[in-house]
Amino acid sequence: TSVANTIERFPLREGSFSYGTAGFRTLWERLPSVVNRMGILAALRSRAKGGQGVGAVVTASHNPIFDNGVKLVDPDGGMLSPAWEGYATRLANASQYDVLLTVSDIIEREHIDLSTVGKVFIARDTRPSGEILVDGLLEGAKAVGAHVEDLGVLTTPQLHYAVRYSNLNSKSSSLQGYMENIVTAFRKLVELNPKGSDVKIDPIKVDCANGVGAIHLKHLAEMLSPLAEYRIYNDGTEGVLNEGCGAEHVKSLQVYPIGLDAAPNEHCCSLDGDADRIMFFYNNGETSGHAEGDGFKLLDGDRMASLLAGFIHNFVLEAELDKELSMTVIQTAYANGNSTSYLTGQLKLQVMCTSTGVKYLHAKALEHDIGVYFEANGHGTVLFSDKALQLILAGVESNPDPDSSKKARSFHILLQLSDLLNQAVGDAFSDMLAVQIALLYRGWSYIDWINCYSDLPNRLAKVRVRDRSIVKTTDAERRCVSPPGLQDVIDRMVKEVSKGRAFVRPSGTEDIVRVYAEAETNKLVDELSNGVIAAVF
Ligand code: 16G
Ligand code: ZN
């Protein structure tokens, strides 16, 4: 099929699509033409990168089941380069005729050598519409002469991983390779535990949001049994995807996922619909009279950042790599102020802030030798630079016996952590296993983990405005430059409140403006939040 033919078969019905922080995401019925064109773009991207593999994943993450979406993955396994997001938006909205013009324009601007053959990996989550949409994706990529590999139903991070290692040749990029890589790293980390390897790993109850995570976690759990025990809830056999469950649900409502009964102090977590996000929680046994959330205690992305950054930094120090390697924690404006104070004050780590969206945090993390990045909502991972990996490997080679010294062991531990933590993108599975390892080494329960610091009271509100594009921000979304005068009003209100902080940003995924506020007490944060909301209207 030619490009002209394939776009005829998937005609544009109505326009106005925009490639946002999560790619394209909307009601699935609107998407056939968009997904088809993203197949075309993925093949072009691959050819522009000298034929390296790129990825396309059909998912709408934590959205309702009748939504879907598509997102492209660059050859390094990361998000599509921002320069190409513009092409994605242009192609998605182009009339049938303009698609051909846009394609030739991209070929010209990107100096694409038409003799290269493209390679596109595709995958989808468990949404029923995914099967239909993937047809158009496949056809679009083939129309531009790409070799297409349909990897079937995968978690988003599995697809990112497959793309990355298909281009690197350092690890097997297959699903089996992905699984064996994390299982091996986890096993070795248990063996390397300074406290000995016969310790008990706390079983964990995992809410899989009735999504793709359930399928692959079942397999992972079999591979890790009996070393670690995973009790799977919301595995998709009965419930509906993301309905009453999943990472977004527990984070935004602060309640237990449906169907998961958490006895006091049991370790639990929730994945989102495509398993690139994770939230941990437990029941502290207190009753507040609000049944769904009685005793509910959440450990979010900020907690993961604090736990893993402190854990890894400890081995960097023991391996005496701290002078040679720069280590930084990357957060967004949503990070609780007390998590930032804990990281900088207690752990003495450098912290940076970027705009919301994995691509921004990931890019910042790449500028450091060890970049720990997490959004409060549970997206994130820890990246190791080539320099870091070389020094760690050299340390392992010159200290082959981990038992010979603390320093020797630290090299071995760091090497396994770099394998366990997904280097392509944040991954609920590898984050879950890394958290389990950190808690195991420290001998910590979730209670010890939560006791590191206490969150400042905070509020996140959605405000519907006539045109959210009027709100423009700067300084990693912490300050508002438009509408004029709004930031002055916020500044005045924040100054009145102890430990006050507030910001306003337009959502990248919904037609609303988000207002975040935090302060020392519940009363103060309510006042601040209400004040800022009133100012936005
Ligand atoms: C997307 C982003 C997520 C971000 C969220 C913010 C990725 C993979 N996902 O889901 O990182 O936190 O958007 O949504 O980058 P908002 O702009 O509506 O607040
Ligand atoms: Zn997701």
Image (cartoon, rainbow, N blue to C red):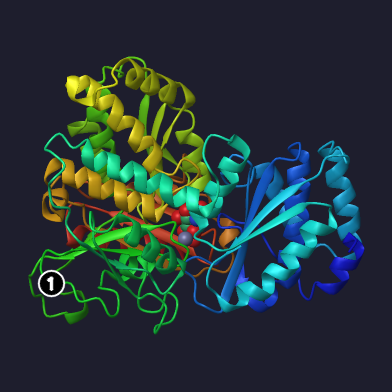
Q: Residue at x 45, y 71 (%)?
A: 211
Q: Residue 408, located in which quarter of the rendered image?
A: top left
Q: Is residue 403 above or below residue 498?
A: above
**Exactly how many numbered labels are in the figure?**
1
Q: Residue 134, located in which quarter of the rendered image?
A: bottom right
Rendered location of residue 339, percent (x, y): 25, 44
**Quarter that holds the N terminus:** bottom right
- Residue sitting at the far left: 286
Q: Residue at x 38, y 74 (%)?
A: 235
Q: Amino acid at mark 1?
A: Ala
Q: Is residue 478 left or right of residue 71?
A: left
Tag 1 secondary structure: loop
The front one of 391 and 247 is 391
Residue 468 in sight = yes
Q: Is residue 423 above or below residue 528?
A: above
Q: Residue at x 40, y 68 (%)?
A: 214
Rendered location of residue 92, percent (x, y): 75, 62
Rendered location of residue 407, percent (x, y): 22, 20
Q: Which residue is mark 1?
A: 263
The front one of 63 and 187 is 187
Rendered location of residue 31, percent (x, y): 69, 71
